[in-house]
Amino acid sequence: MYGVSNWLPTMMRGAGYELGSSLSFVIVINLGGIVGMLVAGRFSDRYSAPLVATIWFAATAVGVYLLGIHLPLALTYVVVFLTGLFLFSAQAMIYAAVAGRSGADNRATAVGRVSGIGRFGAVFGPWLGGRLVASKAEGWGFTAFAVAAVLATVFVSLTGLRSPQRTPGSTAPQQVSTTTG
């Protein structure tokens, strides 16, 4: 998320778009993010945050990859908007998914850990984008960030879509221990 949002104008310039359009894309992707937060929340309440996060990350991967292809300007604005819709809200749905799957006894710890990992992405994404721009390979930024969204899709689908285990007589998910002894 942070790599795309920080380097979008530069990467779009590298993809052949004019400076004015490249700067406008930042506004459009953020407008998509606003709409996405509202839509994802509703869908999450209805279908589940892990499912929405999985679908949203997959859509983000497609959208980010398409940004690297020089499309007609009007279509590019649509792709940028939809990418923002999915990109920003997919990340937010991770917090909802983790909170919903964690028991009351470890919910804060789980969300804190996920947030900490997100901070790593907040540093690594812009760093990676900067390295690609510095090496005149900014076009690879779209591919690299699309791969990150594919990995997020896989990880969320492998962990988030499983049914949480519940203790008999309880409605709260139970933390499953993977250690013995």
Image (cartoon, rainbow, N blue to C red):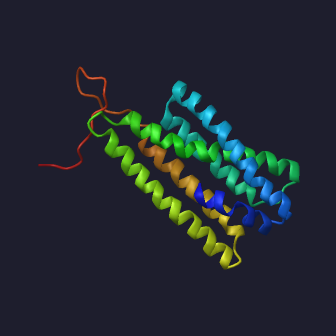
Instruction: Looking at the picture, tell me which residue is in the foreground, 79 or 151.
Output: 79
Rendered-image quadrant of the N terminus: bottom right
Q: Residue at x 69, y 56 (%)?
A: 65
Instruction: Looking at the picture, tell me which residue is in the foreground, 119 or 147.
Output: 119
User: At which x and y percent is residue 107?
Assistant: 33, 39
Q: Which residue is drawn at 87% across and 48% down?
A: 74
User: At which x and y percent is residue 91?
Assistant: 54, 46
Q: Is residue 178 left or right of residue 142?
A: left
Instruction: Looking at the picture, tell me which residue is in the foreground, 26 or 136.
Output: 26
Q: In this view, does 69 lie above or below 167?
A: below
Q: Quadrant of residue 170?
A: top left
Q: In this view, does 120 lie above or below 107?
A: below
User: At which x and y percent is residue 61?
Assistant: 63, 52
Q: Which residue is drawn at 69% across and 47% down?
A: 30
Q: In which quarter of the image is residue 142?
A: bottom right
User: At which x and y percent is residue 93?
Assistant: 52, 40
How many discs mark residues in the rendered view? 0
Q: Report whether residue 91 is seen.
A: yes
Q: Residue at x 50, y 59 (%)?
A: 121
| Outermost residue to the top | 169
Q: Quadrant of residue 146?
A: bottom right
Q: Report whether residue 17 is seen.
A: no
Q: In this view, does 21 lie above or below 74?
A: below
